[in-house]
Image (tube, rainbow, N blue to C red):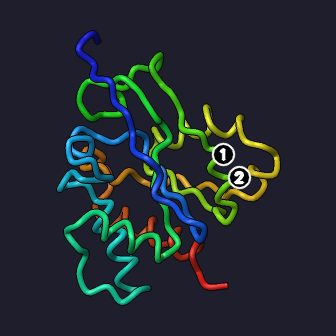
Amino acid sequence: MSDAAHCIGFAPIVNADTRLLILGSMPGVASLAASAYYAHPRNGFWPIAAEYLATEHDLAALPDDFDERYALLLQANCGLWDVLAKAQRKGSLDASIRNDSLQINDFSHLFDEFSRISHIALNGQAASKWFHRLVWPTLSAAQQQRLHCHTLPSTSPTHAALSLPQKSQQWQAVFQLALRQA
């Protein structure tokens, strides 16, 4: 796979109030080109997030501007990041990521700095696999004890085994569990 691109992920979108951290695997080509999380127009992430934000935070419509979208997620105590910081991949498919090129993000530091994070929503099987294999063993016992991981159906348009409403139902249950008012 000599024509694999060197992909570098984005900085985390988190703040001191973040309780639910949503983790993808690595941004796809459209997201990297737009420098924005979940920028592919057919990715179901933003419609799913908008459904939660509309019911819980009186959102009439999802803004087009990604910074405004991030601000809404942060107001809802949600954060975004990816498991992988860097990798080589041809195209956008997780299956095309070269295993010998994986570099994970520094989660131990993130979880120390943002100690209110208690739930992890893993966007798809690849994110779940890499998080549990590469990240989980690097975390302290205290970090592992406070974190609840939820593997959810991928919001990618290539994951067509479930419809968007079926995916959303599973995502909404995690939003409710992780973000219900104390």
Alpha carbon distance from label 2 to label 1: 5 Å
User: Residue at coordinates 45% horizontally, 58% vertically from top-left?
Assistant: 13
**Where is residue 147 drawn, in percent x and y?**
69, 56
Quadrant in which the C terminus appears: bottom right
User: Residue at coordinates 34% horizontally, 76% vertically from top-left?
Assistant: 51
Q: Nearer the viewer, residue 174 or 18?
A: 18
Quadrant in which the N terminus appears: top left
Indicate the amino acid at tag 2.
Asp
Q: Is residue 24 left or right of residue 146?
A: left
**Where is residue 107 drawn, in percent x and y?**
61, 44
Mark 1 is surrounded, within 10 Å at the Cα level, by few (under 14), some (14 to 19) or many (20 or more) other residues, namely: few
Against 60, is 179 above or below? above
Q: Which residue carries the number 2 mark? A: 112
Indicate the amino acid at tag 1.
His
Name the mark on residue 154.
Answer: none
Q: Residue furthest bottom?
A: 58
Q: Is residue 67 left or right of residue 181?
A: left
Q: Nearer the viewer, residue 106 or 90?
A: 106
- Whether the residues at callouts 2 and 1 have beta carbons within 8 Å, the answer is yes
Against 147, is 159 above or below? above
Q: Nearer the viewer, residue 18 or 141?
A: 18
User: Residue at coordinates 58% horizontally, 56% vertically from top-left?
Assistant: 120
Mark 2 is surrounded, within 10 Å at the Cα level, by few (under 14), some (14 to 19) or many (20 or more) other residues, namely: some
User: Residue at coordinates 44% horizontally, 51% vertically from top-left?
Assistant: 123
Secondary element at image label 2: helix
Secondary element at image label 1: helix
Against 52, is 22 above or below? above
Q: Which residue carries the number 1 mark? A: 109
